Amino acid sequence: MIKKEMPKDFLWGGAVAAHQIEGAWQEAGKGMSIADVMTAGSNLENRMITDGVLDNQYYPNHEAIDFYHRYRDDIQLFKRLGLKCFRTSINWSRIFPNGDDELPNEAGLQFYDDLFDELLKNGIEPVITLSHFEIPYHLYKAYGGFKNKKLIDFFVNYADVVMRRFKDKVTYWLTFNEINNQADGQHQLHTWTNSAVLVQPNENAEEVIYQAGLNELIASAKVVKLGHEINPDFKIGAMMAYVPVYPFSANPEDQMAASKVMERRYFYSDIHARGEIPSYTLAYWKQKGYQMSYTESELQALKEGTVDFIGFSYYMSATVTTQKIDDLTGYDIPDFPQAKIVKNPYVEASDWGWQIDPVGLRYVLNTVYQRYNLPLFIVENGFGAYDKQDDSGQIHDEYRIAYLKAHIQEMKKAILEDGVPVMGYTPWGIIDLVSFGTGEMEKRYGMIYVDKDNTGEGTLQRGLKDSFAWYQKVIQTNGQEL
Ligand code: BGP
């Protein structure tokens, strides 16, 4: 008999990140973070990473949506929406402005004390990411980012301070946001935001990224162990970007290619969940002659710091082939030259080319649960779109409702039919915010509109889209009414 009811304690929420909403980039002792030197891009043009902040550039994260000054009003909207939880991050550079400071910045700690108090006062559980692309810029300039093992200690020290300070306010923690997003080693934005690393021309991108990723995984494991000592009730999770990779055809070579490309991603969650470097990665490093640096005590730290759950983002799926298919526009996978990423002819795509595949979410929930036997938490899922206001200024975002409804339906099948334990669902960008990939405001995800455009013009006024009332009902009926 298939259960019809979702778990009573299911955490319906919404997700954002400090650097994409707070603004106040230099306020109250905050240092420059790596997000503060990323200029605005667009659907067609990449963001630039500048050397410091240049006078003649526009940096959308400097003000973002000014959540730092407006969070009390925004939390009233989250309460009206009925959120059970709210995922955001602590901006590391508010706490340690340079990352290697002796003492933390008290004003930065106080801001998050006030923010978490306001959430809890309104019955909303904080879900906190420790590093969501907000590494202090000085840790890049002085140390070269996470390819330098010194960053392990700086991160553990930062996590120690904030987990101790907020141990009675925050139960749910995530260590590194989408830690595997740097896997292909080519998208400079990914190596920058995940590791504060800019691969140099004389460096092997893949080798540098494996080392930086391994250092972050060691740091994450140390923080998991430390967190459980600070408060045994903490639930500390990994945070992965899962993009399932399908074979384009039943040609066995395509299946092998899909499996190998997935290994680049599973390297991260295998270590998070199993506490050891996977055999396929050790074999690959040997085959490539990579000189990776890790010690016996670091391997022991990995074993002792496995995560309590797997948090992950799900937006889209990908399709690969090794076949020479002329009419399919495919693009190379830098770290896997034998295959190409090609369009999946069975699914539609968003205006940014992200392939819309709700069934893929059910597939990820099943395959990841069967791989690790750990609870799962969908901490990002959303539909970026150009929203248009009607004559009265209302946004009828039925396309966003359709996207979220289809994904929630597949999530419910995984929970109610497939027996997968899912802790919660926090759609990405519950309020319009600065896009990470493009720096745009107009790639909107929110159920709450923010009046600001790609050039930074606007009143920052908030408004409720049609999807606000729709999601309110979803939460009120615990997922019954979609
Ligand atoms: C994920 C990030 C989020 C968010 C999301 C949407 O990779 O974890 O921070 O930005 O992508 O992507 P974008 O903002 O580029 O549309």
Image: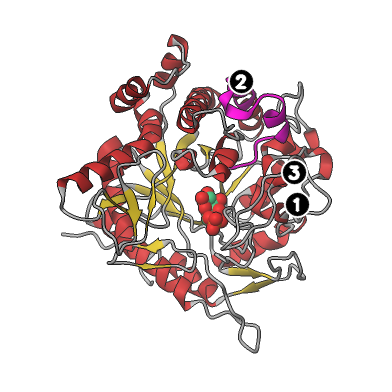
Task: State the mark number for residue 111.
Answer: 3
Kind of residue at disc 1: His
Between the C-alphas of marks 2 and 1, the distance is: 28 Å
Give the mark nearer the N terminus: 2 vs 3: 3
Give the mark nearer the N terminus: 2 vs 1: 1
Viewer can see residue 15: no
Judge depth for marks 2 and 1 and give the one in front.
1
Question: Few, some or many C-alpha atoms within 10 Å of disc 3 (few <14, some 14-19, many ≥20)?
Answer: some
Q: Is disc 1 placed on a helix, strand or loop?
A: helix
Seen at 60% across and 42% down, the residue is 133
Q: Position of residue 325 (x, y in %)?
A: 26, 58
Seen at 41% across and 27% down, the residue is 306
Question: Few, some or many C-alpha atoms within 10 Å of disc 1 (few <14, some 14-19, many ≥20)?
Answer: many
Instruction: Check the image and report above or below for 100 versus 316.
Output: above
Q: Position of residue 374 (x, y in %)?
A: 33, 38
Where does label 2 land, which residue? 153
Q: Is disc 2 placed on a helix, strand or loop?
A: helix
- Are the residues at dot 2 and dot 1 in contact (C-beta closer than 8 Å)? no
Where does label 1 land, which residue? 62
